[in-house]
């Protein structure tokens, strides 16, 4: 919820996150959000609320519980010109995909002589349902 203030709007972090994703999805049809339960009715603590309704299941969808494999999907999609926002629901499992992030996503631009870019966002949170 936004509350007016002297300097403009006041947003909670989760509302700002959701609004930012929606703005980018409206601006660029190649942006999509995926991850475990991003399309759930609880909307990942509200951070994806309304995105499924506005953009449909082709651009907002859940994934299997496989951090490493789904991170590989995000990297491949980014290399193919799409702009994935990959949501990991538990930061403590992010280590399972660090090889993909450090050795594939971060190095691909250089490994392929600047011919490849990997425009992706990986988002994770600390806690689940409680914080």
Image (cartoon, rainbow, N blue to C red):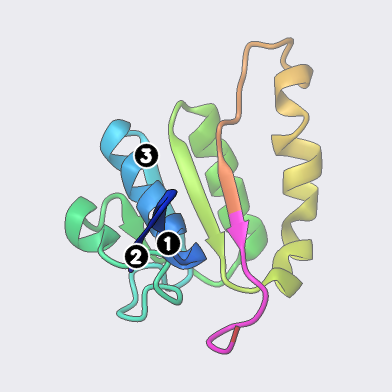
- Which badge, 3 or 1, is on the more N-terminal residue? 1
Q: In this rendering, is residue 107 above or below 54?
A: above
Q: Is the residue marked by circle 1 packed among few (<14), some (14-19), or many (20+) residues within 10 Å?
A: some
Name the secondary structure under disc 1.
loop
Residue 97, horizontal then vertical, whole percent: 73, 57
Magenta stretch: residue 45 in it?
Answer: no
Taking the view exactly as shown, the residue that stands out farthest to the front is 6
Q: Is the residue marked by circle 3 packed among few (<14), some (14-19), or many (20+) residues within 10 Å?
A: some
Q: Mark 2 points at which residue?
A: 3
- Tally of marks: 3
Q: In this rendering, is residue 9 above or below 90?
A: above
Residue 86, horizontal then vertical, whole percent: 53, 53
Name the secondary structure under disc 3.
helix
Q: In this view, does 56 lie to the left or right of 101?
A: left
Q: Mark 1 points at which residue?
A: 11
Q: In this rendering, is residue 75 above or below 18?
A: above
Q: Is residue 63 visible?
A: no
For residue 2, the mark is none
Q: Name the residue under label 3.
A: 24
Q: How far apart are marks 3 and 2 (CA)?
A: 22 Å
* Residue at 30% in and 80% down: 41
* Residue at 62% in and 18% down: 116
- Which badge, 3 or 2, is on the more N-terminal residue? 2
Q: In this picture, which residue range is highlighted in magenta?
A: 123-130
Q: Distance between the residues labelled 1 and 2?
A: 7 Å
Q: Distance between the residues labelled 3 and 1?
A: 18 Å
Name the secondary structure under disc 2.
strand
- Which badge, 1 or 2, is on the more N-terminal residue? 2
Q: Is the residue marked by circle 2 packed among few (<14), some (14-19), or many (20+) residues within 10 Å?
A: few
Instruction: Say which quadrant the C terminus sits in.
Output: bottom right
């Amino acid at each position: 919820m936004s509350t007016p203030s002297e300097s403009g709007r006041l947003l909670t972090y989760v509302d700002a996150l959701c609004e930012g994703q929606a703005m980018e999805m409206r601006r660029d049809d190649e942006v999509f959000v995926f991850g475990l339960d991003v399309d759930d009715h609880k909307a990942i603590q509200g951070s994806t609320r309304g995105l499924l309704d506005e953009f449909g299941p082709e651009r907002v969808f859940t994934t299997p519980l496989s951090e490493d494999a789904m991170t590989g999907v995000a990297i491949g999609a980014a290399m193919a010109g799409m702009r994935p926002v990959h949501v990991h629901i538990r930061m403590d499992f992010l280590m399972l995909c660090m090889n993909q992030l450090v050795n594939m996503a971060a190095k691909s631009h250089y490994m392929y002589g600047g011919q490849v870019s990997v425009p992706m966002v990986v988002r994770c949170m600390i806690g689940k349902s409680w914080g």
